[in-house]
Image (cartoon, coloured by chain):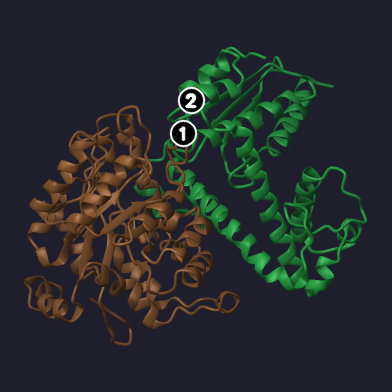
Chain colours: A green, B brown
Amino acid sequence: MSTVSLTADRRGELWARLARVNDPELDEPVTEMGFVERAEVMQNGSVEVDFRLPTYWCSPNFAFLMLDGIREALDALSWAPAYTIRLHDHMFADEVNCGVAAGKSFSRIFDELSGDQDIDALRETFRMKAFKRRQEAVLLGLRRQGLTDREILGMDLFSLDGHIGGEEAEAQKSRYREALIERWPERKGGEPVFVTWQGETILPDALGAYLAELRAVRINMEFNGALCRGLKTARYKEMNVIDGEPTLVDFILDRVPPRNCAARPAHN
Amino acid sequence: MYKTPDGKEVFVVDGHTHFWDGSPENQRNIHGKQFVECFYAYHTALSPKEQLWAKEKFEKYSADDLYRDLFIEGPDDVAIVQSTYLKDFYKNGFNTIERNAEVAKRYPERFIVNGSFDPRDGEKALEYIHFMKETYDIKGVKMYTAEWNGASRGWKLTDPQAYKCFELCEKLGIRNIHVHKGPTIIPLSKDAFDVHDVDNAATDFQNLNWIIEHCGLPRLDDFCWIAVQETNVYGGLAVALPFIHSRPRYFAEVIAELLFWLGPDKLLFGSDYAIWKPRWLIEKFWAFDLPEDIARERGVDLTAEVKEKILGLNAARLYDIDVAARKVALAASPFGVAAE
C-alpha cells in the first residue's frame, strides 16, 4: 500500500473514531458539533487533534469528559500512534494542556481543578439523560408510524430490530439500542425493549406522564445544543452561506481564519 | 406601549435590561474580554440578522441608544435595569447601580433601577444594601451566584451570609430578588447555576418574590418543580424568548411547560437588552400561537390575555405599578410625544 493511501485510510479511521465521541451534555458527536477543529495523521503516523468549545466559559468538567473521550478514541487506533490533544481558547486551556503534556491522567488534572466533583457520577447522569432522550425519539417515532401505545410497549428487542422505519427512525433506533445495551449488557432478545432507566416496565396508561418526563429532559438538552451551535458559529465566525451569498453576520464580523496550532512534541 | 396589529394597547414592563460598559478600555483582563464576547455571541446567534449590531457598539452603547431602542422605537413603557458588577473583570464594573441610576435619571417614571450585592462581602454587603436603599430607594436586586470574588467561583442563595442579606432586604422592603440561573458556564466543582437553592430560600423568605431569570434553563424541569411548590417563585423569560425567532417550535415547548407548571401569572417578559431589543421580541410574541399538538398535550393556551400578563401586568404587580395611573403619566411625558 502506498504511503498516501495508508495515510488516507488512517485519517478515515481517525475521524470515524472521533465521530463516536459524544458531547456528554448534548449527546451529540463532537465532530458534528464542530468542536474538533483539526485532526491530522502526520507522515510518521503520529496524530494531532485541536479542540475548541463554543465559549471560553464552557464548563471545564464537560470539556474534560470530551477530551477524555478523545483520548480513549485515540488509544483505540489500530496503529497505536503517539498523539497530541490540544484544547484552545478555554479559560482552563493551559491547565488542561500542561496536564496532558505532562502525561497526567485526566482524573488527576480534574481533581486539582475541582476538588469534590465526582466525575463518574457526572458520567452516569449524562448516560441516563442520553438514554431518555434517545428513547423518547424512538417512542414518538413509533407513535407517528401509527402504532398504538400498547403495541409499542409490548415490543421486545427482536420485534424492535425487525420493525422497519424510515432512515431517521433507523438512526434513532440504533442509538437507542446502543444506550439500552450499554445500560443492560445482558439484555435478551425476548425482553421488553422499552423500560425506565431503573428497568421498570412502562404501562400504557402511564405512557403520557412518562413521555412528559422524557420531554423535559430533551428540552434542557436541546437548549444547550441550540445555544452551543449558535455560540460556536458566532464565536468562530463560520461563513453561513445562504443562496450562495454570505449573510450579514459575515460582513459585520471580521472573519478570523482558524488559528494554526504550533507543533508540539507528541507523547503516548 | 405596544400597539397590536388590531389596535389594542398593551402595557409593557421589560423585566430585564442592561446599560453596560464592556469596552476594551474598561476590561480588566482576558475574562472581561471573553465575557462580553460571550454576550455578543448570544446576540449574533439568536437575533434576526437585520437586528445585528457591530461589536464595538455592542461593547459600549450610548444612553440615547438605550432610550430609543426601549421606548421610542421600542414598545417598553417601563424598563427594569439590572445591576451586574463583575468588578473582577471590569475596572469600573460592567453595569453598576451608579451607571444605571445615571441613565435612569432623565426619565424616572420609565425606569426601575435594581441593585446588586455580593453576600461574600459579609458586613460590607449589609452596609451596601442600606446604602442602595437610602440612595436609590431600590425595590429589587439582581443576584449573580456564579460571580467570581477573589478565590471564590460562586455562592448559593442558602449560604448563611446570603440569608443575613435577605433578612435585611425583607426588613427594608426590597422585595424582588432576581436571580440569574441560566446556561452552564464558568462553574467548576459545583454548578453555581443549579436551581435547588431557590427552593429553600423561597420557603424561608415567603415575603420576598424570587424571579428566576432565564427560568433556570437548561434546568427547566428542576425549576418548574420548585416553582410549582413555591407561590413566591416567578420565571423571567430572557434568553428563552429569542428562540421564538430561530426555533419557534422549541420555544412553544418551553412556554407550554412554563404555563403548565407555573401558570400565566408567574411569568415575566424581559428582553435582556442590549443582547436583544424588545420590539421584535414583542411583535413575534404577540403574533405567536402555540402549535395545536403542543397546546393539547399540555392543556394550555397562550391567549391575548395571557400575553398581556406576561408582557407587563405580572411585573407591574410585583413592583406596585398602578397601570392605569402610569399610562396617564407616561402619555403626558415628553417622551410620549417623541414616540408619536
- Which of the chains bears the disc numbered 2? A
Q: Across the whole image, how many numbered discs are drawn on residues?
A: 2
Q: Residue at x 56, y 59 (%)?
A: A219
How far across and down, in percent of the image, does residue B219 sit? 50, 53
Q: Quadrant of residue A6?
A: top right
In the rendering, at what x and y percent does residue A158 appear?
Answer: 91, 57
Q: Quadrant of the C terminus of chain A?
A: top right
Q: Are dots 2 and 1 in contact, CB under 8 Å?
A: yes
| Distance in Å between CA atoms under marks 2 and 1 | 8 Å
Residue marked by disc 1: B188
Q: Amino acid at mark 2?
A: Leu
Q: Callout 2: 10 Å neighbours few (<14), some, many (20+)?
A: some
Quadrant for the N terminus of chain A in the image: top right
Image coordinates of residue B302 in percent, x first then y, are 45, 78
- Whether residue A145 can be seen here: no
Q: Is residue B338 left or right of residue A172?
A: left
Residue at x-position 31% and y-position 35%: B33
Q: Quick one: SS at disc 1?
A: loop
In this rendering, position of residue B321 left or right of residue A98: left
The residue carrying mark 2 is A113
